[in-house]
Amino acid sequence: EITGRRSHTVSSSLSRIISVIRKEELERSGLTSFADILEYVSNADIRQRSNMGIQADISLRGSSFDHVMILVNGINLSDPQTGHLGLDLPIDPESIERIEVLEGPAARSLGSGAFMGAINIITKKGTEPEIMRSQTMGEFGLLRIYLNAGIKTGQVYNFLSAGQSSASGYVHNTDHELYNIYYRANTIIQSTQFDLQAGYQSKKFGAGGFYSPRFPDQYEENSGWFGSLKVESGNRLRFNQHVYWRRRNDHFLLVRNNPAFYENFHLTDVYGSQMNITYPAGTFIWNGGIDLRSENILSNNIGFEIPDHIEIKGTDSAFYNKEYQRTNLSFFAEQVFTPKNWDITAGLMVNWNTGFHGKPAIFPGIEIGYTTNNGHTAFVNINRALHLPTFTDLFYTDPLNQGNFDLDPNRIISFEGGLKYVKSFINYQMSGFYNSGKDIIDWLWNYESNRFSPVNLENYVVRGFSSTISYDLSKKALFSNWLNHISVNYMFLTIDKSASATVSKYYNLKHKLSAVLSQNLGRSIFITWRISFQDRFGNAIAFNEPEGFYSIPYKPYWLIDGIVKWQIGYFELFSEVSNILNTRYIDAGSVYQPGRWLKAGVSLTFDYNKRGNH
């Protein structure tokens, strides 16, 4: 079951593209960052500024990194300050049960934050009684330690994980120090299910030219925690309610060892509550509900001036002198109709926001699918979406960026048609789409002021095609002794936007091809190969003395990674080489990514209910 509509459903029945990255794929990949996982096993556009998931932006189908909703177990944890912080979650890949990637506008189903799609991370529940410990070491001073445990106490399943990662950096000022702690508890009392989760992350890293090539000694310290409680009750008439809170501290230095030159402090709080009601009646399923969300920030840079300044904890003479708040209220209704081989979903969401007064926004949509008797599904859908400017879009100012409080919300209407097929050993999905946007926010470079500033584009049209095919060959006798799994993803985009001939922060991929191949040598040695080709539109801004700022084109590149695992009882030895070709490439801005990087380690998995298994 996946989170693709208000009611529970299976991915194969949805009349749109859903990529589900399962536990087996995560384990085969051997990847230790959430961003790297999406890089290879989906059609998402991942723009990293460093390795190990220290900072990464995600976009779908020509969107910006602000336009994708991030959920954990169905809870919206998107950051209203900036999409740069969207993937800053205290969840390590080993803690994930599966990842759901919903492509295309999903505001009608999930809210205005899902402007061009959503990423839902489903974590483990602790139903497997095991303890796992893993340690990885590598070049550039890399040390990573991870521990988790699944424990049942009475009727409650508990899952607890902790992770630590540090490195000295692959070039100047790319060091990092990261700590994650995450807990989840589940229980059922009579017919009521309770799901509690909480997490904390602390992250410090050298942001060598991350946001400006002029300042190679940028530095950030971030910390944050979140908590949520979900309650689902009822039999035929189902009630699903949840509440959540996410708090985040962000401290940024433009020059690492000179705070007085320029620094930012931000404290963001997001509170939310949602209630869904589902009632099945024959071939109909009725859904409805309400969603309330409050977004708040204290800052020395973002927001409106406040008369009483607030001292920032942990500092001697720094104060929050600005604040901004907005509240979002939405009502939604949806009807699912499933006669024979058809699956028809229609609905709408009505949305109000205190930051943008006037008429309420309405997000209608309809999805129609037909599944043949042998399992092939053809589908079409039309959806409308709106996305509010982030706090950074509205207010942020520094020597190289200037926000714009006069921005209007992004608006888009999307048309999609495609085919999909799911069987025991094969899965394919393909679709073509057309997105017509208005007032899409884009940050454009001004060579006169030497600054980026956001503007509303009058027109923004995206045409594209995406396809995914995967084979589970372990179920085929001919291949099972040496080849386990093959998956291939391809995406193509063309983008037309009414922008002047300048440099944008939002240059999307033109072509993306990725493939993963898993094979085994005997019963205990497993090898996984990861291959990716990317070709991006546009140019990046670079800087040198005395020339000053200039642009450089993004160049297409190939990446190849490989990992070998050796299973010995409870133990697993592994060795990974990333970027085997030692490719020199840029994902975002002018920050070059790591070259060839060797990592190795060992993990221990102990099932204390089934001694002798691993």
Image (tube, rainbow, N blue to C red):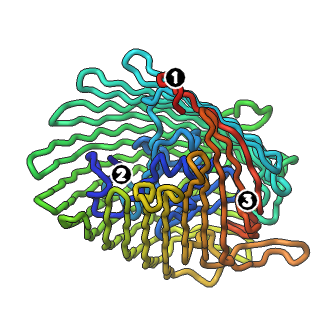
> Counting other residues with Cα less than 10 Å from the Cα at mark 3, is it few (<14), some (14-19), or many (20 or more)?
many
What label does residue 213 carry, if any? none
| Residue linked to disc 3 | 210
Q: Which amino acid does label 2 sit on?
A: Leu
Task: Give the residue drawn at x 75%, y 37%.
Answer: 318
Alpha-carbon distance for marks 3 and 2?
A: 31 Å
The mark nearer the N terminus, 1 or 2, is 2
Q: Where is residue 366 in the image (x, y as percent from the top left)?
A: 24, 64
What label does residue 608 carry, if any? 1
Q: Can residue 38 be seen in this view?
A: yes
What label does residue 110 carry, if any? 2
Q: Which amino acid does label 3 sit on?
A: Phe
The front one of 350 and 93 is 93
Which image quarter: residue 273? Answer: top left
Indicate whether 39 appears above or below 573.
below
> Counting other residues with Cα less than 10 Å from the Cα at mark 1, is it few (<14), some (14-19), or many (20 or more)?
some
Task: Give the residue drawn at x 87%, y 78%.
Answer: 547
